[in-house]
Image: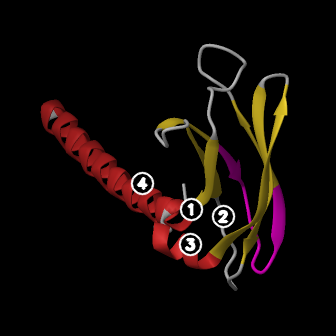
Amino acid sequence: MALRKIGDGILLGLGAGITAGIIFAIINQLMVNMMWGIEAETINNKVEIIEHREVIRNGRTIILGSVKNNSDTNLHTLSVKVDLFDKEGLFVEQCSEYIARLHANTQVNFKIKCKACDSNKTVEHTSYKVYPTGF
């Protein structure tokens, strides 16, 4: 009798655990899609880099600019990325900054600090490209 009760308890616990796991996975996926599930082409249609400029401070490249949400939808998370290129046009470094929330039809400023992994200086480069991404 005691073994039967233990067995029933184990089965009940396993069932509850599996059910909780499935519910957690569904909620997690919905939240990830809500926050990060913006396709790159959708971002390019909704978000516009208004202006940007490169500033050098203490050997570190800083990109200052503005980004605008041209849609009627609030964006929960946006990343503005900068790719740095050398004089041959080869990619040498990527820098980014997150904007936590970009409300519909609004514009905000951003500041992206670029530095090399092994120092506080920026990798040598001659050009850069700024673009928005969803993550």
The answer to whether 114 is drawn above or below residue 30 in the figure is above
Q: What amino acid is found at the position of numbered circle 2 in the picture?
A: His
| Residue neighbourhood size for the residue with mark 3, other residues' Cα within 10 Å, grouped as few (<14), some (14–19), many (≥20) | some
Please state if 93 lies on the left or on the right of 71 as rendered.
Answer: left
Front disc: 1 or 4: 1
**What's the residue at 59%, 20% (across, down)?**
117
Location of residue 120 by image quarter = top right
Q: CA distance from mark 3 to mark 4?
A: 32 Å
The disc at residue 44 is 3
Q: CA distance from mark 3 to mark 2?
A: 15 Å
Q: Amino acid at mark 3?
A: Asn
74 vs 56: above or below = below
The residue most toward the front is: 88
In-front residue for pair 81/58? 58
- Which residue is tagged 1? 35
Amino acid type, mark 4:
Phe
Residue at mark 3 to residue at mark 1: CA–CA distance: 17 Å
Residue identifier under label 2: 76
State the quadrant of the C terminus: bottom right
Q: Is residue 47 magenta?
A: no
Question: Residue under circle 4?
Answer: 24
C-alpha separation, residue under disc 2 versus residue under disc 1: 6 Å
* Dot placed on the residue nearer the N-terminal end, 3 or 2: 3
Residue shown at the point (72%, 55%) measured from the top left? 100
Q: CA distance from mark 2 to mark 4?
A: 21 Å
Range covered by the magenta-colored residues: 96-109
**First reached walking from the N terminus: tag 1 or tag 4:** 4
**Residue 2, horizontal then vertical, whole percent:** 18, 31
- Of tags 3 and 2, which is closer to the observer? 3
In this rendering, which labeled residue sits more in front, label 3 or label 1?
3
